[in-house]
Amino acid sequence: MRYLVRLCLVCLFLVGCSGKDSEAIQFYTHEGCPYCEKALKYIQINYPKLPLQVYEIGQPANMVKFVECADKFKLDRKQLGTPLICMGENYIMGWSQENQKLFNEYVKSYLPKK
């Protein structure tokens, strides 16, 4: 019986992870972070239809997701910062001109094909 319960929980987890949430870009921000504001403004202006989910890490549930994203990429928890942008198999932490270029490259797979 325990095996069946565990199997059901694993199935629910996998179904939840394979839904629309996994297709969207996850953007982790912290209130008052100027780099987060710049990055978000850039994305909203240049990619207004981009599937973007914004998580304020000041909320406990969002902090859990933030740590899960960091763990996925094996990021050192002592070095974590915002914005943290998780894009499939890629991530960007912080915002600079170099990270903006990376974002523009990574985002191509999220844009509609012409």
Image (cartoon, grey):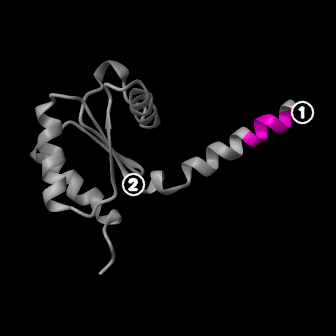
Q: Are marks 1 and 2 in contact (CB under 8 Å)?
A: no
Disc 2 element = loop
Res 112 quadrant in image: bottom left
The amino acid beneath tag 2 is Ala
Where the C terminus falls, by quadrant? bottom left
- Magenta segment: does it hold 4? yes
- Magenta segment: does it hold 100? no
Residue occupying the far top of the picture: 78
The residue lying toward the viewer, choosing from 79 and 52, is: 52
Res 6 quadrant in image: top right
Residue occupying the far bottom of the picture: 114
Instruction: Give the image location of residue 106, x and y in percent.
Output: 29, 57
Q: Which residue is mark 1?
A: 1
Image position of 60 (left or right of 54): right
Task: Decide whether the magenta segment is chiefly helix, strand or loop.
Answer: helix
**Start-end of magenta stretch:** 3-8
Q: CA distance from mark 1 to mark 2?
A: 36 Å
Badge 1: how crowded within 10 Å, few (<14), some, or many (20+)? few
The amino acid beneath tag 1 is Met
State whether residue 41 is above or below residue 112: above
Query: Reading the chain from its start, which is encountered first: label 1 or label 2?
Result: 1
Where the N terminus falls, by quadrant? top right
Residue occupying the far right of the picture: 1
Q: Which residue is mark 2?
A: 24
Instruction: Give the image location of residue 11, x and y in percent.
Output: 70, 46
Residue ID at (32%, 18%): 78
Instruction: Give the image location of residue 51, x and y in percent.
Output: 34, 58
Disc 1 element = loop
Image position of 82 (left or right of 10): left
